[in-house]
Amino acid sequence: KPLGETMVAQGYVTEADIDDVVANQVQEDLFALFTWAQGTFEFYKGSITDAHLLDQLDKAPRFDVNGVLLEVARRSDEWQRIIVTVRSLDEVFVVRDASAILKPNDSTAVVMESCKKLHTLRELADVTLLGLFECSRTVRELLECGALRRVTFEEGLDAAEQQLGAGEPKRAAMTIKAILERGEHRLRAVSEK
């Protein structure tokens, strides 16, 4: 039995609460598709005859296509500004100066608290439950005001070791790639000569 149904049955949440969470998750995943630089998809033309699939589609959230496309366009512009600042979704950020936050809010509070541990931006989105876009936007704001900083080369390696220890070798590799792309290790090697 799905977790949402169990939570509703036990009175922890309402069905409307579950519907809102699922719709938000589907919407975030849909918007994330538009951030891909490459990918493939398959489209099948025709009527759906599988009863199970029809039932699943009937339960799926409905979206206004025009509204989704407008939001995709808005987010696309903002994603460009976010990526210029954060550089990579696999970067790791830590607290530099919490007093530098100009406009504290729930998002900044949860990101700052989560940055007390070593998390990539992708992991922060999962840990904070903000979604990748909102979390990335918040991290950008916190970097710009000086509340957060990128980890040092050594701190990045520590984060990758933690990811390996947690059984996530792909994330560890992406974290190492992100810190290597900065080139700091090469600059340090040159300056030490």
Image (tube, rainbow, N blue to C red):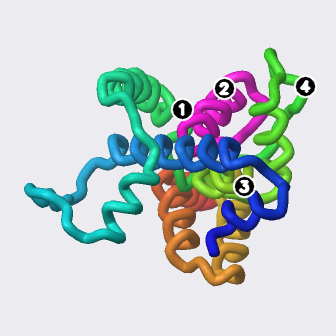
Q: Quadrant of the N terminus?
A: bottom right
Answer with mark 4 or mark 3, whichever residue precedes in sequence. Answer: 4
1 and 4 marks in contact (CB < 8 Å): no
Task: Quickly name the residue at label 2.
Answer: 141
Prevalent SS, magenta region: helix
Q: CA distance from mark 4 to mark 2?
A: 14 Å
Q: CA distance from mark 4 to mark 3?
A: 23 Å
Q: CA distance from mark 3 to mark 1?
A: 21 Å
Task: Quickly name the residue at label 4.
Answer: 99
Answer with mark 4 or mark 2, whichever residue precedes in sequence. Answer: 4
User: For numbered disc 3, what is the local secondary structure?
Assistant: helix
Nearer to the camera, 176 or 43: 43
Left or right: where does residue 19 sit relative to residue 64?
Answer: right
Q: Is residue 148 magenta?
A: yes
Establish if 156 lies above or below 87: below
Image point 60% across, 35% down: which residue?
A: 134
Task: Quickly name the residue at label 3.
Answer: 127
Q: How many marks?
A: 4
Viewer-nearest of discs 2 and 3: 3
Image point 74% across, 47% down: which residue?
A: 14
Q: Amino acid at mark 3?
A: Val
User: Which region is colored magenta?
Assistant: 129-149
User: For numbered disc 2, what is the local secondary structure?
Assistant: helix
Q: Amino acid at mark 1?
A: Thr
Image point 45% across, 25% down: which residue?
A: 78
Establish if 87 lies above or below 12: above
Image point 66% across, 32% down: which residue?
A: 138
